[in-house]
Image (spheres, rainbow, N blue to C red):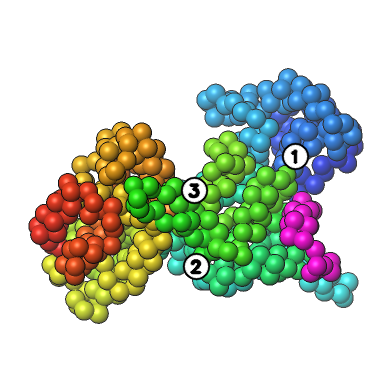
Amino acid sequence: MPIIDSQPTEEEFIEAQKNWDLEKLYVDLASAKRKALTPVEKKLLRGLLCGCSPAEIAKRVYQSRSSSTVRVYLSNGLYKYIEDMLSNNLGDSVKVKNWSYVTHLLEKAGYKKNLFYVKQITTLIKNIKEQESGVLKVESPKIQDWGEAVDVSSFCGRIAELATVSEWILQQHCRLIVVLGMGGIGKTAFSIKLAQEMQDQFECVIWRSLHLYPTIDVMLAQVMQTLSPTVQIDETATLNTRISQLIHALRRVRCLLVLDNVDSILCSGNANSLTSNKLDLVSQVQYLPGYEGYGELITRVGDSQHQSCLLITSREKPAAIAAIEGQKLPVRSLKLSGLSRTESLTILEAKGLLVSDYTDSSVLIDWYGGNPLFLKLVATTIQNLFGGSIYEFRLFGTLVFGDIRRIIEQQFNRLSELEKYIMYWLVLNPNCDSVLNFKTQIIPGLSPRLGQRLILETLELLQQRSFLDIKSASLSPATVWRDYITERLREKYFQSPAETENSLLMSDSVLATQLKNHIKKSQYNTQI
């Protein structure tokens, strides 16, 4: 095995040794190269391990704006050595796709130190030395401000989703992550669990909820006070200036900033209506009056270069996100779906239900789409009113009630008339399982071309609002949504058929007939 260069290492990027087993990595790469790494190669490797791009390495080491020399060095040298080393170890071909992929590959190969173990040993040795000298000092903790974050000690599942977002942030250096999902799906718990698991990778963690509608000025003041407690905040500064100050702080301090319940400050635009044969434009997700500054904040944090990450959770995707997100861009979005059957059973068991009957448990989980909050709520009802029998609850046949209905109704009421109409149409036409199969003339009084455009815009908006999962190749709403919409139509129709809430619905004679037949035939226990 080649002997590693014994010359003193240079100082650039020496901080990499805190997190990586550099000596072992030097030896193994030298073996793949068949000769010792040069000081320059070691320096570039350390730069990559510190998360620096070729351009950042060139600027820091060579004070050059051009990264071409560094890229050539990497492509013709280090990348090949890493590929050869890992391919030999794994017995399979490994390719370095780009500079950011290096840390991911080497961490998977085991070259990253156990940070928790190293920290504990380092602290222990430091305390022993200080005790021997008669002075005991307590190491200052990292900055953490959890606000009103709830307890997630009983968090269940989401292993794949946690791993995906962690890789986006830590390995692919995403600056903005949007976690989407319908009410009760577990977005808040997910954001807290994720932040807890990654807290050691950041100098600062700040978690805030927007459910009490804090203004953008209050939020920025709180965040800046945590990030830069010694800096005096200028309350007379413009919003743009204060956002610029925050971005500067996010460049200086590696921070994970979480804004939960962003949908609290969102609303729909003008509702669609059919008046004088003129249909208004499809409403878009907008910010409440006075909260538009959050849109500016989110967009600029996603566009600007910095070493931090902003993670937001919402039932609805803010309009500006679509333009800046992408699978290979530093802005990503993740939609949380229901828990798996195994994870859902864990929730039911924790609530004290007997889940030995696989059929009863499976039907219950399917009814509520694996929504963890809905499962917890219905499990309590089953315990209190049905003696813990899922079978008897199924016989009763009512899915949507109490807090479950309140959550669903709150989200449904945010829809425009056209969005509600499309949801009604999908419930009454369950065989429509693809956008291509969607009839383009279902909106009465419109030309096929205009109807086609409005349908596409509305379906996309319903997906952004977490009502539909078009990626699953199905347009059919979840069972709990179908039950709620059927009951809503039943109540409205039997109260006064002529005043059914959706004028579009009743103006379509075919759909109105479908509605009447559907309501007469619908039974709550059809799935039993």
Marked residue nearer the N-terminal end (1 or 3): 1
Residue of label 3:
334
Dividing the picture into quadrants, the one containing residue 52 is: top right
Query: Does residue 246 show up magenta in the picture?
Result: yes
User: Badge 1: few (under 14), some or many (20 or more) residues near its Cα, within 10 Å?
Assistant: some
Residue 72 falls left or right of residue 350: right
Q: Are marks 3 and 2 in contact (CB under 8 Å)?
A: no
Percent across and percent down for residue 153 are 49, 68
Q: Secondary structure at mark 2?
A: loop
Label 1 amino acid? Cys
| Circle 2 residue | 152
Residue type at the position of mark 3: Leu
Say which element carries label 1. Answer: loop
Q: Tell me the residue that label 1 is attached to.
A: 52
Of 320 and 365, nearer the camera is 320
Which is the main secondary structure of the residues drawn in magenta? helix
Q: Residue furthest front?
A: 276
Quarter of the N terminus within the rendering: top right
Instruction: Specify the segment rendered in magenta.
Output: 231-252
Helix, strand or loop at label 3? It is strand
Quadrant of the rendering where the C terminus is positioned: bottom left
N-terminal of the pair, mark 2 or mark 1, is 1
- In the image, residue 491 lies at what x, y percent? 21, 67
Image quadrant assignment for residue 65 = top right
Viewer-side label of 3, 2: 3
Q: Looking at the picture, tell me which residue is in the foreground, 451 or 527.
A: 451
Q: Residues within 10 Å of mark 3 (few under 14, many from 20)?
A: some
Marks 1 and 3, how far apart in space? 26 Å
Going by the numbered disc 2, the residue's amino acid type is: Val
The magenta stretch spans residue 364: no
Q: Distance from label 2 to label 1 (Cα)?
A: 34 Å
Q: Tell me where residue 214 appears, x and y as whole percent.
A: 61, 70
